[in-house]
Amino acid sequence: MEVRQLQIFKILAEELNFTRTAGRVHTVQSNVTAQIKALEEELGAPLFDRLGRRVALTDAGRRFQPFAEQALTAMEQGQRALQAGAEPSGPVRVGAPESLLTYRLPAVLRTFRRRFPYVELVFRPHTDASLGAELETGKLDLALHMCDAITNPIFVSIPLRTERVFLLSHASLPIARLRTVKPSDLAGQTMLLTEFGCGYRAKLDRVMALQNIRPGHVTEFSSVEAIKQCIVAGMGVAILPAIVVASELRRRQFKVLNWAGPSLDIATHIVWHKDKWVSPAMAAFRDLVRETIESSETEDQHRG
C-alpha cells in the first residue's frame, strides 16, 4: 500500500469525481483509476461504486476511510516532528462553534499572527455531533467546545472559562414584562434557536423536556447573527451567550429575561485527542488561547 494511493483515495472520497480528483493530485484521470484499482486489489474489496457517471463510496470504502485519513495525518505529523525547530510552523486545524469563532478567537488570532508568523491556522465550525469524529480522524487538531464537561476518555481537555448565557427577547413582547421567567412561561412561545447540537441550546432543551414544556414554534438558525436580527424584529425568544449580544445590550436592542430556571451558563474547553502528537504550533496556539480566554474571564469578574 503506497502513500500516493491513500492520498488519491482520500481526495476521491471527498470529490466523488475522477476528473476533479485528477486535477487536485496533478495527474491524469487514468492514473487515478489505476491507483484506486491497485488499492482495491490489495485490500480485496471494492472501495467505490461506479454508477455511470456517478461515483459513490461502498460500505468497505466508508469503513476504510477513517483509517486512511489517520494514516495520512500520522505521516504529516511525523514529518513535522522531524522538521520542527525552535520556531513553530505548519498548519493547525481548529474547530469552534460560531459564537467563539466570531467573538473570542479574533483577539487570539491578532496576537498569534504577530508571535508565530510561520504557523498556518485553519478555522472550521463544528457541532457536538461532528466533533468526536473530526478529532479522531485528524481533520481537526484542536477544538474549542462549549459543554459542561468533557467525559469521553479519548480526549484531553482544559476548561478555559464559563460563558454566561442569556434568555432574550425584544422589550415589546409580553414575556419581557414578566418579573421572572420560569420554564413554564416558555410554553407556547416562539423560540429562536441555534441548530440542534449546540451546547447551550441542548441545556435549554433538557430543561423543557424534563418539565414537559412545549414551545409554540421553534425556528432554527445556522447563524447567531440571523437570530439577533430576528430578536430585534420581535419574532420570538432566543438563547445566546453574553459575548454574542454585548453590543446589542449596550444599545438596549434586546431585553435580558430574568430567568428563574436552572442555570444556562456553559463552560468553554479546549480539546484534543489523547494520542495526538502536540506539535510546537499546536502547543503555541493552545497556550495562547488559554492565556487570552482565561484572562477575559478575570476581566469580566473585575467589571462585574
Image (tube, helix red, strand yellow):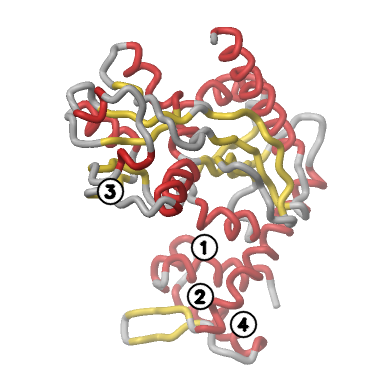
- Residue 123 spot, x, y in % from top left: 51, 40
Q: Earlier in the sequence, mark 1 or mark 2?
A: 1
Q: From mark 3 to mark 2, how far is it between C-alphas?
A: 53 Å
Q: Which residue is mark 2?
A: 32
Q: From mark 1 to mark 2, how far is it between C-alphas?
A: 9 Å
The secondary element bearing badge 4 is classed as helix
- Residue 221 spot, x, y in % from top left: 30, 45
Q: Is residue 227 left or right of residue 9?
A: left
Quadrant where the image shows the N terminus:
bottom right
Circle 4 crowding by C-alpha within 10 Å: few under 14, some 14–19, many from 20: some
Q: Are marks 3 and 2 in contact (CB under 8 Å)?
A: no
Q: Earlier in the sequence, mark 3 or mark 4?
A: 4
Circle 3 crowding by C-alpha within 10 Å: few under 14, some 14–19, many from 20: some
Circle 1 crowding by C-alpha within 10 Å: few under 14, some 14–19, many from 20: some
Q: Which residue is mark 1?
A: 25
Foreground: 255 or 2?
Answer: 255
The secondary element bearing badge 1 is classed as loop
Viewer-side label of 3, 4: 3
Q: What amino acid is at disc 3?
A: Pro
Q: Are marks 1 and 3 in contact (CB under 8 Å)?
A: no
Viewer-side label of 1, 4: 4
Foreground: 230 or 40?
Answer: 230
Q: Which residue is mark 4?
A: 39
Q: Who's the residue at 46% across and 26% down the image?
A: 103
Q: What amino acid is at disc 2?
A: Val
Q: Earlier in the sequence, mark 1 or mark 3?
A: 1
Q: From mark 1 to mark 4, how far is it between C-alphas?
A: 16 Å
Q: Is residue 156 left or right of residue 263?
A: right
Q: What amino acid is at disc 1?
A: Val
Q: Which residue is mark 3?
A: 215
Q: Earlier in the sequence, mark 3 or mark 2?
A: 2
Q: Are marks 1 and 2 in contact (CB under 8 Å)?
A: yes
